[in-house]
Amino acid sequence: MAAVYGLRTLEQGSGLWNARFREELAPALLSGVAAHAISHLPSPAASGAGLMLGALGHAGGWPIPRGGSASIAAALADDIRAHGGVIHTGTPINRLEQLPAARATLLDVAPRGLLGMAGDALPTHYRRALERFRYGNGSCKVDFILSGPVPWQAAGLSDAGTVHVGGTRAELARSENEVSAGRHPERPYVLVAQPSRFDPSRAPVGRHILWTYCHVPSGSTKDMTSQVVAQLERFAPGFRDLVVESHVITAAELAEYNRNYIGGDFSAGVMDVRGLVQRPVVSPVPWRTPLLGVYLCSSSTPPGPGVTGMPGMHAAKYALKDVFRLPVPDLGLS
Ligand SMILES: Cc1cc2nc3c(=O)[nH]c(=O)nc-3n(C[C@H](O)[C@H](O)[C@H](O)COP(=O)(O)OP(=O)(O)OC[C@H]3O[C@@H](n4cnc5c(N)ncnc54)[C@H](O)[C@@H]3O)c2cc1C
């Protein structure tokens, strides 16, 4: 199975990606998923991520949390409190010394955050590697309040939690490759989530919400609302007339909102082959830093971005093993 995945990844990440297709639909579907990687198309990292995400979609769907993604954070916080933990929020940490003394410290920060907190205490080779760490392109997020559900032209799209808007494989590639080249696409690839179609708690009666974003060059301050609306209007004629209100967060604003999103890159590191292997350093245990008891657990560590909890799980496993000499629980996930 792994061999088939590897072969398909190479094929779909190369100039041969159209070899097995005669029509437009399947390649467009695959490219829409691959484009999540915010990478050049075709490329092995994008096709690898896309095939993995596509397989997950077929195996278990792409669930949307009831009540919104804040309900995931709330559930995790409840679990910490149930185990006697105390949570402090709203305090930016600029130096490690700000934190209370602890045997193990897990930092959910990008390499730049660790450099700021402890750069002078890090060995030169590790500090240089963090300084060289590459961040990817950004996203511009455009959210809508609508007076009705999106009038998709294509049958079935009203029942999809996530919709990739962008047209054919060639159009999707053109859009993503414009971003790779540092330009803003006029017809962007737009990721759309329509949670209020499935969860009535997300909008008052008679209203719908729509979350969208498109990829833009790193650090972009451009408001992409008109390009996003034009793309939605193209595939859902009448969309524009349903917009009650829209709200934009540019890539530069995303970076201010979350220090890990450097330049608006919410993957916290380029998603190409080198960026997957060097996350943030090439090491069998990349979550471990050279500082005793200090671990990185953000998406700048393997397996990378997404609400998976996996970087945190790996960092916690090594903290238990290294610092507390405890047997590592087999969670059946690694
Ligand atoms: C618009 C958007 C849509 C997305 N859609 C999806 C999706 O559908 N599915 C999916 O799986 N993923 C999605 N993601 C990606 C996902 O949110 C991230 O990959 C994931 O949250 C990364 O987890 P993390 O723990 O590494 O960092 P984060 O979730 O970013 O958490 C890090 C936290 O640490 C805080 N922090 C950083 N530095 C400091 C400091 N110095 N002091 C104090 N606090 C600090 C940050 O403010 C943040 O609260 C999306 C992201 C965005 C922006």
Image (spheres, rainbow, N blue to C red):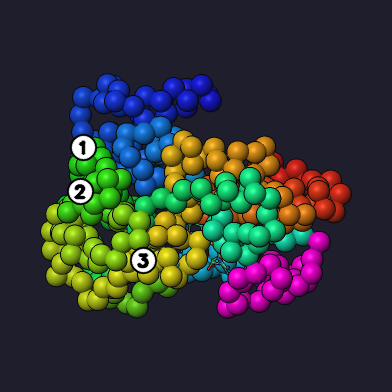
Name the chief secondary structure element in magenta.
loop
Which amino acid, by three-letter code, is at mark 1?
Ala
Instruction: Please state which of residues 222 and 330 is positioned toward the viewer in this rendering.
Output: 222
Q: In this view, does 85 lie to the left or right of 113?
A: right
Q: How far apart are marks 1 and 2 (CA)?
A: 19 Å
Nearer to us: label 3 or label 2: 3
| In-image side of 189 versus 311 (left or right) | left
Q: In this view, does 41 lie above or below 226?
A: above
Q: Can residue 135 be seen in this view?
A: yes
Callout 1: 10 Å neighbours few (<14), some, many (20+)? some
Q: What residue type is labelled 3?
A: Ala
The residue indicated by pointer 3 is: 252
Q: Distance of mark 1 from mark 3, alpha carbons?
A: 28 Å
Q: Does the magenta stretch include residue 97?
A: yes
Which residue is under mark 2?
154
Secondary structure of residue under mark 3: helix
- Residue 249 place in picture, x, y as percent: 34, 69
| Residue at horizontal 28 percent and vertical 50 percent from the top | 182
Q: Earlier in the sequence, mark 3 or mark 2?
A: 2
Magenta region, residue range: 76-103
Q: In this view, does 151 lie above or below 134?
A: below
N-term-proximal mark, 1 vs 3: 1
